[in-house]
Amino acid sequence: MVLVTGGAGYIGSHTCISLHEAGFDFVVFDNLCNSSQESLARVEKIIGKKIPFYQGDIRNKQDLQSVFDTYKIDSVIHFAGLKAVGESVTIPLHYYDNNISGTLVLCQVMQENNCKKIVFSSSATVYGDPHTTPIKEDFPLSATNPYGRTKLFIEEILRDLYVSDNEYKIILLRYFNPVGAHKSGLIGEDPNGIPNNLMPFISQTAVQKREFLSVFGDDYDTHDGTGVRDYIHVVDLALGHVKALQNMDNVQNVLTVNLGTGKGYSVLDMVKAFEKASGKKVPYKIAPRRAGDVAKCFADPSYAFEVLGWRAQKGVEEMCEDSWRWQSQNPDGYDSKI
């Protein structure tokens, strides 16, 4: 049985579908602070099966222990965490408490229950401002914001855990920029308030929920002056977690893997691609650069194929089409009636 912390969130909910399709049994644990139980209800609709769900906080040992008391958990996919870069700069202590303290409690409960397999949801933010691209796993690590630092610290905590006990099987998956939605249009990204990520901002502007898209900075050293990122379809990303679980027993030491496409697209590239997929205009205004943003960030994904047999399959057109399907069918996210 796989414990999926943060399994009601954007990436977690898509991963639940991939786990089911690959034949894994799983239980979801989520405090619903930036997710919705409706996402799990819709996942149940897609997979035709009830999902065991516990609402609780990973900082609360009793909440977690109740799951381990009920199920024989043999591995954990750890998504639970706060994830907004800008917000992390404003309330860093909250991010350190939630993300790091929560992971420590999770690791303690795993240890006490002899559960020694974990796939951790890390991030390309651990590379800070990379000197060159594409980014390989052995690049120097740093962080330009508290969110990225929490990911970096958790990676170090998990490495120390392995040093203390070599029986642990630990895979750190460093995501680039997840976008898109499930083909059904039933689940997708539903951020609270103003979106922090580009794609929901673009799609909310396309359905006229927002007046215009703010493009933060047009003076970067890129082909059109706007920031370049590696956008990866969330379904490809979900499959990366399944591949990680399937390859868990072969892991020596702590395995660190980039999950990206290896292609960089600028903000304006994505606006054009989305306009083409949706047939809608996406008005935008140039705004000042955001603190902590970098000019270019895209992966060298070759190691993921080498060690996990995983490769991103979906291109930018499909990412935009699936994002548009989700947004147009659910203009108010999970509050939309279906």
Image (cartoon, grey):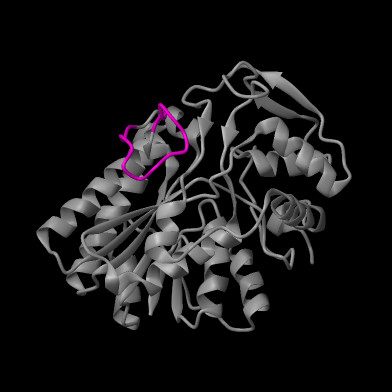
Between 177 and 83, the one nearer to me in the picture = 177
Instruction: Please name the residue shown 67% across and 43% down the image.
Output: 199
Name the quarter where the C terminus is drawn: bottom right
Instruction: Please name the residue shown 10% across and 58% down the image.
Output: 164
Name the quarter where the N terminus is drawn: bottom left
Q: Which residues make up the magenta segment?
A: 128-142
Relative to residue 219, is residue 243 drawn left or right?
left
Between 16 and 217, the one nearer to me in the picture = 217
Image location of residue 28, percent across then percent down: 46, 70
Q: Main secondary structure of the magenta part?
A: loop
Instruction: Please name the residue shown 57% across and 82% down the image.
Output: 50
Image location of residue 149, percent across then percent down: 34, 36
Relative to residue 235, is residue 102 drawn left or right?
left
Image location of residue 20, percent across then percent down: 53, 78
Q: Is residue 66 visible?
A: no
* Residue 274 sits inside the magenta stretch: no
Residue lying farthest left?
164
* Relative vertical location of residue 95 with respect to residue 111 in this rendering, above or below: above
